[in-house]
Image: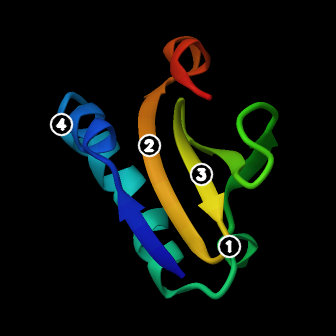
Amino acid sequence: MEVIIKKSYVKDIAELPDDIKLQIKQPILLLENADHIFDINTDLKYLEGGPKNEKYLRFRIGRYNIGAILRDTTLILVVVGSKGDFYKNFP
């Protein structure tokens, strides 16, 4: 699976503590080597909203959420945030 990382995701990651960065990095590495997003064992949920040709996803890792867009076999990582801030900014 191809994983594309947006600038907003990189900015959000830079603001997190180092231990959280390591926790978030592991599933992303697994996604790059997976054939499908459900091949990794993580809390994943489809979100409503946005254009019909795109699927919005939320990955929960600890107390943080990763917002992503799924287009065919490409996963675009958009934002990272704590639960309260995440749903204000995504989708």
Q: Tell me the SS state at disc 4.
A: helix
Marks 3 and 2: in contact by CB < 8 Å? yes
The amino acid beneath tag 1 is Asp
Distance between mark 2 and mark 3 Cα atoms: 7 Å
Position of residue 38 relative to residue 15, above or below, is: below
Read off the residue under disc 3.
Answer: 69
Residue 72: mark: 1
Q: In the displayed structure, does residue 7 sit left or right of residue 40?
A: left
Which is in the foreground here, disc 4 or disc 3? 3
Read off the residue under disc 2.
Answer: 78
The amino acid beneath tag 2 is Val
Read off the residue under disc 4.
Answer: 14
Marks 2 and 4: in contact by CB < 8 Å? no
The quadrant holding residue 91 is top right
Q: Tell me the SS state at disc 3.
A: strand
Which is in the foreground here, disc 1 or disc 4? 1
Spot occupied by residue 55 in the image (x, y as percentages of width and height): 73, 51
Residue at point 73% right, 41% down? 51
Q: Tell me the SS state at disc 1.
A: loop
Of pointers 1 and 4, the one earlier in the residue sequence: 4
Distance between mark 1 and mark 2 Cα atoms: 16 Å
Position of residue 54 relative to residue 37, above or below, is: above
Which colour scheme appears in the figure?
A: rainbow
Q: Tell me the SS state at disc 2.
A: strand
Distance between mark 4 and mark 3 Cα atoms: 20 Å
Spot occupied by residue 8 in the image (x, y as percentages of width and height): 30, 36
* Residue placed most toward the observer, 20 or 7: 7
The amino acid beneath tag 4 is Ala
